Amino acid sequence: MPGQLLMRSAPSLRGSAAPRGAFLCSVAVLGGTLVFGGQAPAFAQTGDIEALQRQLQQMQQQMDAMRAQLRDLQAQQAQQARETGPVRRPPAPARSRVEPAAPRIAVPPQGSATPAAAAAAPTRPPPTSPAASTVPPGRLADSIAIPGTDGRVRVRLSGFVKVNAQYDFDGRYNSDSVTTPSIPLANASTANQDGNLQVSARRSRIRFESEVETGWTGDWRFSNQVVEFDFAGSDASTSDVGTSNSYEPRLRLAYVTLGPVMIGQNDSLYLFPPEAQAERLDDGTFLGTSNVRQVGLRYTANLAAGLTGAVALESPYSDVTSTATTNISNDNGQGSFVGSNNVPDLLAALDYRQAWGGLAARGVARQIKVDNQAASVASQRFTEEVFGWGAGLGGWVEMGRMIGALEGDRLFAVANYGRGIGRYLDGTANGYGATTSFGLPGTAPQDSVLDAVGVTSGMVGYRRAWSSTVRSNIVASLARYDYASYVRGFAGTAGNTNRQATEFSVNLIWSPLPWIDAGIEYIYANRDVLNPAVVGAYGGTVSRIQASFIGRF
């Protein structure tokens, strides 16, 4: 019967979320069937009034039961709404859009031969466009999205314009950066000339960066590409300086990263963190620090809270000096006697950073080899190699953590020692990774030896923040060299064979805007040669003042 059908349906409705209107509509349809259906005439014909009354009574009971079920259903719906909140439609998927172009925003310059802001990452101009101010968290800062990539590819163009003016007080140093191990000797012709003024913008830089979202997770989520160059490739000719100053571009950086892996030309892993270096205006590398950019393969990992480690294989470079000349790898101009390499250099680094400051350790192991097997005379053929190594320890202390009045001040120091560390430490003249007795009078080629040059260096400095926009840096360094005894007999290369070198600088830098630096710096450098009697001078000295203006974009 319809009433029985309704009763069988009720349990299924009790647990459902059917609307009240639909439920009442079903009741009305079934009620109409009972009242107007074909069974009512049957009751009237038989005159069984009592049976009809019983049937109506049953229907009434069924209606009461359905009302109770409806109340239970409404109570369940109200409880569910309180527990889960109102039901919301899922949002429509966001439409991809092309971000508007952003102005070119500054980036801290990279590399070890740094301008004023390299030691401490400079602040950038405030963003002035939606693209610059809405970079997603974790993406390349101050970058813009490439249209059509759904934001997966972002790019940034940055760099700086740098103008240097240098004046030498004593003599003339024909370089726009001070390299202490090779400054002119006191008896050189330039040392007897009056002071000299030179002005240049060749140290300006341009940097291109891109970041691609790989679709992978974790440390491998992004890949970055960097190309950077300046205009210090070579000095302009005398006539060109008088007219257009057209300096040649020079590749500085060109590398790709995929998560923790880097491959390409970058600053060597031996370069200490910027916190352990001085912020300088001179573009040369300060004595006792590193200035190597070369191709390498590097892996970096987070080892613990604040502690990172890295290992790298980098381009080799055998630099060997004899009594007659300096020989380097692949130097076709030196005839048969050349530097040679069979394996890459191996480097490792640890950096530990905390709020109070940090520590950094560096290490390098390398092969230094000389090859004269191409000599036409068999008795002149000579091949030898030596193991070169070096290690360094640096650190810095944020003085404001100990003394509130010194907020922004930093004390830093670096010490290095090695035998055959060579070019990884600015303080060793070019070619002095090792020396050889080959070519000395009375030494047969087959009896020649190859010895790594020992180097000890130390650097200490202090950064003083006079205000939020004015700061000074004072730094001093010393390097000493240890050679095999036969080096005292060198003749043709004696002028570059240093016994020790020192360097000192102090500066004052003003940043009227976050992307502009203007400063003045005094530099004093000195080197003493090993054989002053041979070269006719004890060494050489540079005393220079430099003014610089840097504008980042």
Image (cartoon, helix red, strand yellow):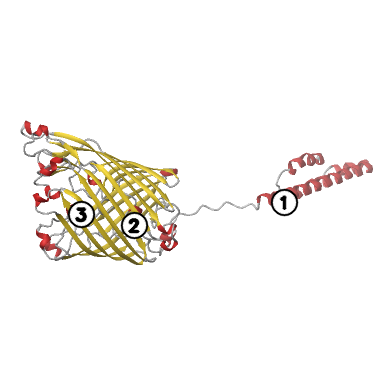
Instruction: Give the number of the disc on residue 78.
Output: 1
Judge depth for marks 2 and 3 and give the one in front: 3
Closer to the N terminus: mark 1 or mark 2?
Answer: 1
Helix, strand or loop at label 1? It is helix
Amino acid type of the residue that numbered disc 3 sits on in the rendered structure:
Thr
Relative horizontal placement of residue 400, taking residue 70 as reference (left or right): left
Amino acid type of the residue that numbered disc 1 sits on in the rendered structure:
Ala
- The structure residue drawn at horizontal position 8% and vertical position 36%, both measured from the top left corner, is 443
Instruction: Give the number of the disc on residue 180.
Output: 3
Asked if the residues shown at circle 1 and circle 2 are in contact, with their CB atoms under 8 angstroms apart, the answer is: no
117 or 444: nearer the eye?
444
391 or 53: nearer the eye?
391
Within 10 Å of the Cα at label 3, are there few (<14), some (14-19), or many (20+) other Cα atoms? many
Quarter of the picture containing the C terminus is: bottom left
Relative horizontal placement of residue 50, taking residue 488 as reference (left or right): right
332 or 323: nearer the eye?
323
Q: Position of residue 550 (x, y in %)?
A: 29, 63
Q: Position of residue 523 (x, y in %)?
A: 23, 61
Note whether 313 is above or below 514 in the view shown.
above
Closer to the N terminus: mark 1 or mark 3?
Answer: 1
Helix, strand or loop at label 2? It is loop
Asked if the residues shown at circle 1 and circle 3 are in contact, with their CB atoms under 8 angstroms apart, the answer is: no
Within 10 Å of the Cα at label 1, are there few (<14), some (14-19), or many (20+) other Cα atoms? few
Note whether 213 is above or below 442 in the view shown.
below
- Distance in Å between CA atoms under marks 1 and 3: 84 Å
Amino acid type of the residue that numbered disc 2 sits on in the rendered structure:
Pro
Helix, strand or loop at label 3? It is helix
Within 10 Å of the Cα at label 2, are there few (<14), some (14-19), or many (20+) other Cα atoms? many
The answer to whether residue 283 is seen in the rendering is no
- The structure residue drawn at horizontal position 42% and vertical position 52%, both measured from the top left corner, is 139
Residue at which label 2 appears = 108
Closer to the N terminus: mark 2 or mark 3?
Answer: 2
